[in-house]
Structure formats: structure tokens, C-alpha cells
Image (tube, helix red, strand yellow):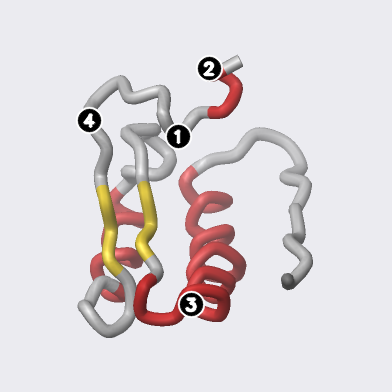
Amino acid sequence: MEQRRFRKVKGILNQHGSHSILQHHEVPSGLRLFGSDFTIRRDDEPKRTSEFCRVFLESKQTPEVISIMKPPAQSTHLNPIKLL
């Protein structure tokens, strides 16, 4: 099994940092590990729903590249801190 890599974010994560993570880490890693079965699960966090990130994801969203699944509003399923 391939080793997973974590990245430390310096300072406060904003829409540009979230876009950088998507572009340089999340999408390439997901495609490498899962191929066309890769699904991004997004929540309603403002920095991840900004137009900047939304346009990037929409440009990548095709059946043969990635699919995007949006959870219900106020969902804690994607927030491990809230699950503790």
C-alpha cells in the first residue's frame, strides 16, 4: 500500500490555499490512487465553496476524470474533529 503524505498549512487556510491543495495534492493524488473511480467529497466550508475553487473543480468534473459528491448541509461526516 502506498504511503499517504500529509502537508502542514502555514497560517490561516483561505480560498487560495484550498485551491492550491486541490490543484497540487488532492486531485493528482486521488487520480493516481483511484483512477476514474475518484470522487471528491466536499462540504459547505466557505473557503472550499468559493468561486475560485468551484470553477477549478467544474473544469475537472467529467465522468472519466473525477466526480464531486456534495453532502447535506451542516453534515459532520467530513469533519473528523466534530466526530470526536
| Circle 2 residues within 10 Å: few <14, some 14–19, many ≥20 | few
> Picture coordinates of residue 16 (x, y %)?
51, 52
> Picture coordinates of residue 26 (x, y %)?
54, 63
Q: Quadrant of the C terminus?
A: top right
Residue occupying image coordinates x 32% and y 33%: 44
Q: Amino acid at mark 3?
A: Leu
Badge 4 or badge 1: first in the primary sequence: 4
| Residue 77 as seen in the image, left or right of residue 49 | right
Task: Give the residue number, with chain letter if any, for mark 1.
Answer: 78
Identify the element where label 4 is drawn. Answer: loop
| Residue 25 as seen in the image, left or right of residue 70 | right
Badge 3 or badge 1: first in the primary sequence: 3
Q: Which mark is residue 31?
A: 3
> Picture coordinates of residue 75 (x, y %)?
33, 25
Give the vertical position of 22 relative to 59 (above or below).
above
Q: CA distance from mark 4 to mark 1?
A: 11 Å
Q: Amino acid at mark 1?
A: Leu
| Residue 23 as seen in the image, left or right of residue 67 | right
Count up the numbered dots: 4
Q: Are marks 2 and 1 in contact (CB under 8 Å)?
A: no
Q: Quadrant of the N terminus?
A: bottom right
Farthest-out residue, front: 1
Residue occupying image coordinates x 75% and y 53%: 7
Task: Give the residue number, with chain letter if any, for mark 4.
Answer: 72
Identify the element where label 3 is drawn. Answer: helix
Farthest-out residue, bottom: 64
Q: CA distance from mark 4 to mark 3?
A: 25 Å
Badge 4 or badge 2: first in the primary sequence: 4
Badge 4 or badge 3: first in the primary sequence: 3
Q: Amino acid at mark 4?
A: Pro
Task: Give the residue number, with chain letter if any, for mark 2.
Answer: 82
> Picture coordinates of residue 51 (x, y %)?
28, 51
